[in-house]
Amino acid sequence: MSPIKKSSNAKDYLRMYTQMVRIRTFEDNANQLYLAAKMPGLTHMYSGEEAVAVGICEALRTTDKITSTHRGHGHCVAKGAEFKEMFCELLGKEEGYCRGKGGSMHIADQSNGNLGANAIVGGSMGIATGSALTSKFLGKDDVTVCFFGDGATAQGLMYEVMNMASLWSLPVIYACENNGYSEYTRTDEIAAGSILARAEAFGIEAHQVDGQDVLAVNALTEKLVERSRKGEGPFFMELMTYRYHGHHVGDINREYYRSKKEERDWKENRDPIIKFRGWLVNEGIATEDEIDGLNAEVKSDASAAVEYALNAKFPDVSEVDMHVFTDVEHALA
Ligand SMILES: Cc1ncc(C[n+]2csc(CCOP(=O)(O)OP(=O)(O)O)c2C)c(N)n1
Ligand SMILES: [Mg+2]
C-alpha cells in the first residue's frame, strides 16, 4: 500500500474501509435480488472497483459534484447515498432517489452532489463539463468528477469536452475506470494507443494510478482536487481496476472472453478490501475483531434496507408521467 497519509486519522481510514464494504455489500444484495427475480431489469455490479469510487469521493466535499455511469451504485454510495433509498430505487418504489422511476442506471442524489448515473456510455462527460463550467461561472470553487469506463473513450463527446475544458481551465477531473473490458471485449482490442495520451493531446495533465489501492487513489485525488479549486484544472486520471462480475448480472458464462484464472487472480491477490483490511490491522488502526464487527454492522444495515424496500409502496399509477421530464415553467420561474 501507499505510505500513510499524515493528515488522516484512524477514523478517516475506517470510514474509507466501511464505505468500500458498504459498496460490496450493497452489490451482493442487489445481485441476490436479481437472482431471486425480485428486481426488475438488469444491473451492472461494481464489486472489485470499490477503491476507485471511495478513494475519489473521500477527497470531495458534499458540494462537489460527480457524474456516474451504468455501473454506478458504487459512486452513489461513496458520495453519501443511503441504502434504503438506493434499494427502493432499484425496486421501483416511491421512496427511491428518483421515486422509483430511474432504477439502477439512473440514480441521482442531488443532496450529495451526485448529478446522476447515465446509461448512455460517455453521456455524462458533457454533463460533468457543463457542471464545472457552472461552478466557474458562479465563482464557486466546487470541483466535478466525471466517472466513465475505458469503453467510453471511444465516444466523440469526450474529445469535444476535453478540448473545451482545457481551453477554459475548468474544474473537472475525468476519472477513467479502466477495468480491462468494454462489455465482452478486451480494452486492448478496441482502444488504440494510450488512454492517457488522449488527454495529454489536449494539454490536460494525466495520471495513471492503481485503482485497487484506496490510499493511492485518495492521495492523488486530493492533490488534483486542491489544484482544481485553484483554477489549475482540468485533470485526467486512469484508474487500473477490475470488475468481478460479468458485464451485467446476467453475464454468467463468460469464459469465452476471460478466464476463471484471471478472475481468481484479481480476487485473491488484488482485492481492494482485503488489501486495505490487512493494512489497517498491520498499522494497528483496528483489530481483526473490530473489522469483523464493522462488516457485520454493514451487513445488517443492508438486510434491513432490503427488507424495507421489498415492503415499500410503488408510486401511484396517477404519477406515471410525473417527475420524468423537467417542469419547464417551474425551471424558468
Ligand atoms: C452510447 C452507447 N453505446 C453503447 C451502449 C451499450 N453499452 C453499455 S455498457 C457498454 C460498455 C461500456 O464499457 P466501459 O465504458 O468500459 O464501462 P464498464 O462497463 O467496463 O464499466 C456498452 C457498449 C450504451 N449503453 N451507450
Ligand atoms: Mg470497462
Image (cartoon, rainbow, N blue to C red):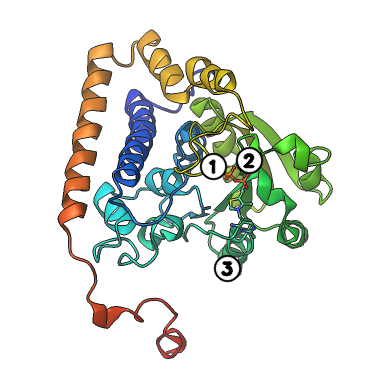
Q: Amino acid at mark 1?
A: His
Q: Is 159 drawn above or below residue 332 in the view shown?
A: above
- Kindly tell me whether mark 1's CB lies below 8 Å from ligand 1: yes
Q: CB of mark 3 within 8 Å of CB of mark 2?
A: no
Residue at 74% from the left image edge and 52% from the top image edge: 154
Separation of residues labelled 3 and 2 (CA atoms): 37 Å
Mark nearer the N terminus (3 vs 2) = 3
Q: Residues within 10 Å of mark 1 (few under 14, many from 20)?
A: some
So how many labels did they put on this image?
3
Say which quarter of the image contains residue 32. top left
Q: CB of mark 3 within 8 Å of CB of mark 1?
A: no
Say which quarter of the image contains residue 45. top left
Say which quarter of the image contains residue 266. top right
Is 173 displayed left or right of 289 in the figure?
right
Separation of residues labelled 1 and 2 (CA atoms): 7 Å
- Residue 289 is situated, as x and y percent measured from the top left of the image, at 23, 14
Q: Which residue is mark 1?
A: 247
3 vs 1, front mark: 1
Q: Nearer the viewer, residue 214 or 85?
A: 85
Q: Which residue is mark 3?
A: 134
- Residue 79 is situated, as x and y percent measured from the top left of the image, at 41, 48
Q: Which residue is mark 2?
A: 184
Q: Is 6 drawn above or below residue 81 in the view shown?
A: above
Q: Residues within 10 Å of mark 3 (few under 14, many from 20)?
A: some
